[in-house]
Amino acid sequence: AALEAALDNSAFPEIVSAAALGLGALGPACPPSAKAKLVIIARSGSQSASAAKRAAAQCGR
């Protein structure tokens, strides 16, 4: 829950990137709601987009 909440902290892209990587590392334990947020961030073009894209690919697998 804390990692997913950290995805909403757009003021600190480093925190968003770290949370994204942590969620991706959860693999099958990554919640579907987190994957949805990761996909949105990955498409945003923000500083955290590349980390979110990698994490979204691993989330849920």
Image: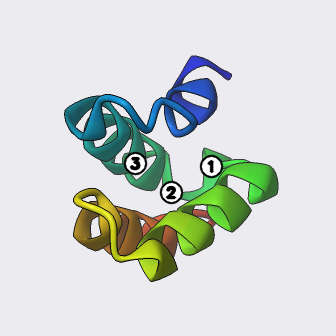
Whole-angstrom CA distance, mark 3 to mark 1, is 10 Å
Residue 29 or residue 37, whichever sits in front: 37
Instruction: Tell me if residue 36 comes above or below residue 12 in the rendering.
Output: below
Question: Residue placed farthest to the front in the image?
Answer: 11
The residue shown at (60%, 70%) is 40
- Position of 54 with respect to 27 (left or right) is left
Question: Residue placed farthest to the right in the image?
Answer: 33
**Label 2: few (<14), some or many (≥20) within 10 Å?**
some
- The answer to whether mark 3 and mark 2 are in CB contact below 8 A is no
Report the coloring of the rendering: rainbow
First in sequence: mark 3 vs mark 1: 3
Look at mark 2 in the image and give the residue it sits on: 27
Look at mark 1 in the image and give the residue it sits on: 30
Whole-angstrom CA distance, mark 3 to mark 2, is 12 Å
Dot 3 amino acid type: Ala
- The answer to whether mark 2 and mark 1 are in CB contact below 8 A is yes
The residue shown at (39%, 64%) is 52
- Position of 47 with respect to 22 (left or right) is left
Dot 2 amino acid type: Gly
Question: Residue 19 at x, y = what percent?
Answer: 39, 36
- The answer to whether mark 3 and mark 1 are in CB contact below 8 A is no
**Label 3: few (<14), some or many (≥20) within 10 Å?**
many
Whole-angstrom CA distance, mark 2 to mark 1, is 6 Å
- Position of 13 with respect to 36 (left or right) is left
Task: State the quadrant of the C terminus.
Answer: bottom right
The residue shown at (47%, 45%) is 23
Question: Residue 55 at x, y = what percent?
Answer: 40, 64
SS for callout 1 = loop
